[in-house]
Image (cartoon, rainbow, N blue to C red):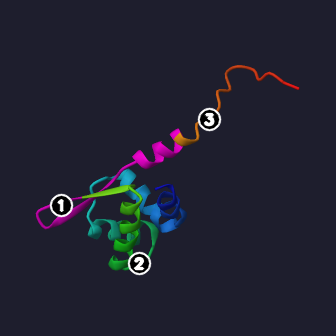
Amino acid sequence: MADDLFKALADPTRRIILDELTERSGQTLFEICGRLAMKHGLGISRQGVSQHLAVLEAAGLVTARREGRCKFHDLDTAPLRRITERWPLPDTSAPEENTP
């Protein structure tokens, strides 16, 4: 699962898609394509965006739900939380003791 997550986050276009879903969750493919073109100047095809969304879904970062004929995409940050729980930061509130 971590491999899929890091692969998904490695691509700058996928990170932009995640940023857009953070700003406004529940977007359709058409809406995402429009925002990528207008806001970011990305000339990527609908098929290309769809493939990026598939990678994000496989990593668990995006969930899709159907309502009638529309498919809406939502951000899911649970995989990111699992990564931070896997490698927690050490408690730095207490001074470290030097042991020989």
Which of disc 2 and disc 1 is earlier in sequence? Answer: 2
| Kind of residue indicated by mark 3 | Leu
Residue beneath the point at 75% across and 20% down: 95
Quadrant where the image shows the C terminus: top right
Q: Residues within 10 Å of mark 1 (few under 14, many from 20)?
A: few
Instruction: Mark 1 or mark 3: name the one nearer the start of the chain.
Output: 1
On the image, numbered disc 2 is attached to which residue? Answer: 44
Is 11 situated left or right of 19 in this image? right
Give the number of the mark in front: 1 or 3.
3
Pinpoint residue 81: horizontal percent, then vertical percent: 46, 42
- Residue type (three-letter) at the residue carrying disc 1: Arg
Q: Which residue is mark 1?
A: 66
Which residue position is annotated with label 3? 89
The earlier-in-sequence mark between 3 and 2 is: 2
Based on the displayed image, in which of its 4 quarters is residue 49 positioned? bottom left
Q: Amino acid at mark 2?
A: Ile
Magenta highlight on residue 67: yes
Where residue 35 sits in the image (x, y, percent)? 36, 66
Q: Element at badge 1?
A: strand
Which range is magenta? 65-85
